Amino acid sequence: MELIDGTVIARHGSLIRVQVENRPLLVTARRNLTWEGGTPEAPKIVVGDRVSVERGTSDGVIVAVRERSSCLMRKAIASPQPQILAANIDQALLIFATKNPEPKVGLLDRFLVASHLAGITPVITFNKIDQGEGRTKAWTKLYSGLGYTVLQVSARSSWGLGQVKRLLPNRTTLFCGPSGAGKSSLLNAVYPGFKLRVGGLSEATGKGKHTTTRAELMPLPFGGFVVDTPGLKEFGIWEITSEALQHAFPEISENLGNCHFSNCSHVHEPKCGVKDAIETGLIDRGRYRSYCQLLEEIG
Ligand SMILES: Nc1nc2c(ncn2[C@@H]2O[C@H](COP(=O)(O)OP(=O)(O)O)[C@@H](O)[C@H]2O)c(=O)[nH]1
Ligand SMILES: [Mg+2]
Ligand SMILES: [Zn+2]
C-alpha cells in the first residue's frame, strides 16, 4: 500500500478524478474518510479538495481530505441548503469587458463581496482593452485606490496577458464574470492547450448550449489549476451579515469609527461617518449604491 497526495479535479457520480503529479487518476472515496479540518456539515468531496489516495495493486481510494483553505458556495437550485462549488480556490479573476457586453459595476461589487466572504483574493480584470478603455478607465483608478489589483488586458491582441500568466503557476484560479466578457478567450490565450469554445450563446439562459452546472479544475502544464465557471449569478452572498458586508467594503470599514451610532447601517442614521465621507468625496457614490443594494437584499 502506498499513500499519495492529489487534488480533486472532477466528480462523476461516485467516481472522482484526482490529479496526482502530472496525471489524472480515477478513484473512489472510502466510506469512513478522515476529514483533517473536522467533518464539514455536508461531508462531500468537491473539486479542489486536497486528498490522500491509497493505492493498492489496482484502483485508488481516497482515505483522507485535508483542511480547506477556502470554500466557494453557491445557492443550490433544488435544495434550500447551499452547496460547495469548489474548495481551496486561491484567487478569482473577475473578468469584465470594457464594452460588449457593457460592464456592470454593481455586479463587480457583488463579486468582490463574494470573494471576500469566501476568502478568495480577487483580481479585477478588464478585458477587450483593444476596444478602448471606456468606463473602465475611471474604475481602474477607483478600485486600485481601494487596494484591489486591477489588470487591463486583451485576449485578442495579447495586451497585458503576461500579468495574467504570472498569477497562475501553482495556484488555483477561478475565471468568472458575465457571459461574453471573454473568460474562455483569456484561458485559451494563456494556455492554447485548453481549446475552449469561444462565443457560445448566452450562458445565463443556456439556450442552444450545453451548460455545465458543475465546476471542473483544469490542470495547467506549469502547475496550478484554473476553473472556468458558468455564469456566476449564484455566486453566494446570501449568507452574509450586515456587519460582514460593511467589512467587505474597505472604504466603509475604514470609516466605521466615525459614526455616532455604533450599530449604524449608514443608510438613514444621522451623524454618519460614511455619509460624511461620501459628501467629501472620500467614498465613491457608485460603491455606496452597491453597498445599499446588497444591504437591502440581505434584509
Ligand atoms: N475585441 C475583443 N473581443 C474579444 C476579446 N476577448 C474575447 N472577445 C470576443 O468576445 C466574445 C465572447 O468571448 P468568450 O471567450 O466566449 O467569453 P465568455 O462567455 O466569457 O467565455 C467572443 O466573440 C470573443 O471573440 C478581446 O480581448 N477583444
Ligand atoms: Mg466561456
Ligand atoms: Zn454610519
Image (cartoon, grey):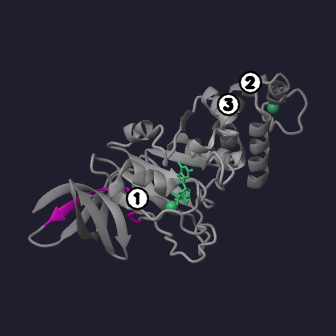
Quarter containing ligand 3?
top right
Count neighbours of disc 2 (C-alpha within 10 A) and say few if under 14, some if 14 to 19, many if 20 or more.
Answer: few
Query: Which residue occupies 76% across, 47% down?
Result: 295
Q: Is residue 52 above or below residue 98?
A: below
Query: Which residue occupies 76% across, 24% down?
Result: 282
Label 3 element class: helix
Q: Is residue 224 left or right of residue 207?
A: left
The percent position of residue 202, horizontal first and vertical second, equals 61, 68
* Mark closest to the chain's N terminus, 2 or 1: 1
Query: Which residue occupies 70% across, 38% down?
Result: 246
Give the label on residue 142, or none: 3
Which span is picked out in magenta? Answer: 44-55
Q: CA distance from mark 3 to mark 1?
A: 41 Å
Q: Is residue 88 visible?
A: no
Label 2 sits on residue: 257
Q: Is residue 56 visible?
A: yes
Q: Is residue 111 above or below residue 229?
A: above
Q: Is residue 53 magenta?
A: yes
Q: Is residue 64 above or below residue 266?
A: below
Query: Which residue occupies 69% across, 33% down?
Result: 138
Q: Is residue 77 magenta?
A: no
Label 2 element class: helix
Q: Is residue 257 left or right of residue 126?
A: right
The percent position of residue 107, horizontal first and vertical second, equals 67, 50
Q: CA distance from mark 2 to mark 1?
A: 38 Å
Give the label on residue 39, or none: 1
* Mark closest to the chain's N terminus, 3 or 1: 1
Count how many numbered circles sit on residues in the image. Answer: 3
